[in-house]
Each structure stands twice: as structure tokens, then as C-alpha cells.
Image (cartoon, grey):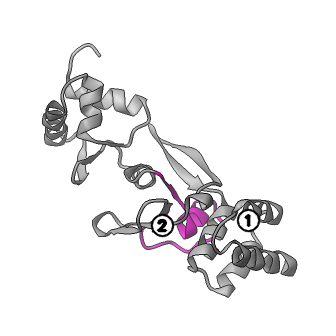
Amino acid sequence: MKENSIYSIKEFALNAGKAVITPAEIANILGRPKSIGAVYAARLVKKGLAKRILRGKLSLSDDDFAIASQLINPAYISLNSALLFHGITKQVTNGIECVTTTNSIRIQKLGIVYHKIPSSLFYGYKRVSRGQSYAFFAEPEKALIDGIYLGVYTKQQLYEYVGNIDKKRLLELSTRYKGYGSRNIMKVVESLTELH
């Protein structure tokens, strides 16, 4: 990078698709010690080129989906947030719902909820371009499976959603899950697909 300016840091990070960056990553971009990364992070915020969203995390984007799926690693947007994105439901969610293999957490000030799922259930999502960045979204069928695993949907919601998704893909994705509660998921999916 020619000059270690805050503008070139932001440009470099956005060219890599980063919506969320840490002082350590800034230090890596600069090839300098971590302490220098913190100084440049503060300068990015002061100049209005980034927002401090959590301790040690800056946002370079205003896209809530990109921020939500990059803030905690690994994570992808799922449940009703993914179903709304895919046009399966019109019900607007109260915040963004994600799943992760790390601990469940609610970040009130950002309106993001992360639900913990086992690593054996962490699949069935795609990277989607969001402006200069990207977000990870569950396929509609996988969002339904995540919801069945987490017990967040009513029977009525399940019947409504299953009528608007690819039932073959739903079965295919549910058989990939080999872990605790997999029999229950398969049972629910099979009963849903039989009824439609």
C-alpha cells in the first residue's frame, strides 16, 4: 500500500469485501504492530470512515446484513431473517437472526441475535454480494431446518413456509444433519413434506 493513510486502509479492506474490521486486521494491512492498528482504528472513526460497533470491532459498511454475518465468525443469517430475504415470508423480524457455532448472544444495540447450533448443522448457506461487501444467508430450506432445530416456529408457520420452498431440497438438507436431535428434525421434515 503506497501511503499508510486511513483512506487507503478503508479502500483496501472494502476491496477485500470486509464490512467489519478489527485493529489487529488494520495492523496486518499496514504490516505494523497491533498498537498501531488501534491508533488507525481511532482515526478511521474520528474521520467518519468507520463506526465503532463493539469493543475492538469497526464497521466500514452501513449494510446490516453484511455486518451481522461478519461480526461473529462463523455465522450466517438464518431463520425468519433469511426467509424474509428470500421472499418466503413477509413478516418483518425484530432485528437480524443469525446462527453460529460459538455461543448464543444477543447484541441489543445492533439488533442482532446469534443462536448456537452444532457444527454438524453449519451448512446450507451462500455468500451474497451486498454493495462493496457480502453477507452469508441460509438457503430457505436450511433456514427452516435451523428453526426446527431451535424450536422457533409454530406448526402453523412451518406449514405456511413449507408451501413456498423446495421440498426436495428440504429433505436433502435435513438428511445431511447427523447429530443430536437429527431424528426429530427428520421426523418433522418428513411429516411436513408428506402433507404438501
Q: Where is residue 26? Give x, y as percent.
A: 26, 32
Range of magenta residues: 74-98
- Left or right for 160, reference 14: right
Tell me if residue 83 is in the magenta stretch. Answer: yes
Decide: few, some or many residues near mark 2? Use Cα within 10 Å; few <14, some 14-19, many ≥20.
some
- Give 153 or 120, whichever is nearer the viewer: 120
Decide: few, some or many residues near mark 1? Use Cα within 10 Å; few <14, some 14-19, many ≥20.
many
Q: Is residue 116 above or below residue 51?
A: below
Q: Is residue 121 above or below residue 63?
A: below
Looking at this view, name the residue that lies furthest to the top.
2
Tell which circle, 2 or 1, labels the residue nearer the N-terminal end.
2
Taking the spot 39% from the left edge, 38% from the top edge, the residue there is: 18
Q: Where is residue 192? Give x, y as percent.
A: 79, 78
Residue 111's image quarter? bottom left
Q: Is residue 188 above or below residue 137?
A: below
Disc 1 on helix, strand or loop? helix
Label 2 and label 1: CA atoms lie apart by: 18 Å
Taking the spot 57% from the left edge, 60% from the top edge, the residue there is: 85
- Left or right for 87, reference 166: left
Disc 2 on helix, strand or loop? strand
Q: Is residue 18 above or below residue 108?
A: above
Amino acid type, label 2 = Lys
- Give 117 or 12, whichever is nearer the viewer: 117
Taking the spot 25% from the left edge, 22% from the top edge, the residue there is: 31
| Residue wearing tag 1 | 174
Whether the residues at callouts 2 and 1 have beta carbons within 8 Å, the answer is no
Amino acid type, label 1 = Ser
Tell me if residue 125 is in the magenta stretch. Answer: no
| Residue wearing tag 2 | 116
